[in-house]
Amino acid sequence: MVSIRLKVGPKGQIVIPKVFREAYGIKEGGEVIVEPREDELVIKRVPDTEELLRKLKEYHKKRKGKKLVKLGDLKGISLEDEFDEAWGIEE
C-alpha cells in the first residue's frame, strides 16, 4: 500500500494529490465522506447517482422473493450491520 505524508493547513485542510483524485474519481467541487475509525480517518468518494441506482437494483434483485419484515422482527438485529453488509462496506 502506498502512503503519502500531507501537510495540514491553518484551517485543518489537506489537498488530496491528483493521482489519488483521478484514481478514485474525486472531482473538483465534488464531495467526499470522512469516516472516523479507532486510530485513523478514512476518506471515501461519494458514489454518483448511477452507481447508487445500480446498487439499489442489485439489492432489490437479491431481496426478491424474500418475505417482508414485520414490526418487531428487527428486535435484536443491528440495522447498521445489515446496511453495511447489503452495501458491501467492510470495517
Image (cartoon, grey):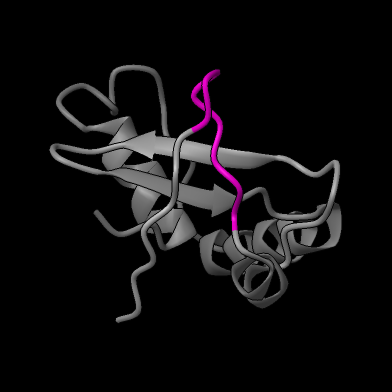
Residue at 59% x, 54% y is 16
Lateral position of residue 17 relative to residue 70, left or right: right
**Of residues 64 and 58, the one drawn nearer to the viewer in this rendering:** 58
Q: Is residue 43 above or below residue 50?
A: above
The residue lying furthest to the bottom in this view is: 1
Could you say which quadrant of the image residue 3 lies in? bottom left
Q: Is residue 31 above or below residue 43?
A: above
**Of residues 16 and 24, the one drawn nearer to the viewer in this rendering:** 16
Which residues, given as a range, are shown in magenta? 9-16
The quadrant the N terminus occupies is: bottom left
- In reply to whether residue 13 is colored magenta, the answer given is yes
Q: Where is residue 61 in the image (x, y as percent from the top left)?
A: 63, 68
Lateral position of residue 14 relative to residue 80, left or right: right
- In reply to whether residue 51 is colored magenta, the answer given is no
Q: In this view, does 40 lie above or below 61?
A: above
Residue at 69% x, 68% y is 18
Could you say which quadrant of the image residue 76 lies in? top left
Q: Where is residue 10 in the image (x, y as percent from the top left)?
A: 52, 20
Give the main secondary structure, helix, strand or loop, of the magenta stretch: loop
Give the mark count. 0
Q: Is residue 68 above or below residue 85?
A: above
**Of residues 2 and 63, the one drawn nearer to the viewer in this rendering:** 2
Could you say which quadrant of the image residue 51 lies in? bottom right
Lateral position of residue 38 relative to residue 14, left or right: left
Q: Where is residue 7 in the image (x, y as percent from the top left)?
A: 44, 44
Residue at 72% x, 73% y is 22
**Of residues 77 and 36, the one drawn nearer to the viewer in this rendering:** 36
Lateral position of residue 39 relative to residue 88, left or right: left
Q: Where is residue 20 in the image (x, y as percent from the top left)?
A: 59, 70
Residue at 47% x, 37% y is 34
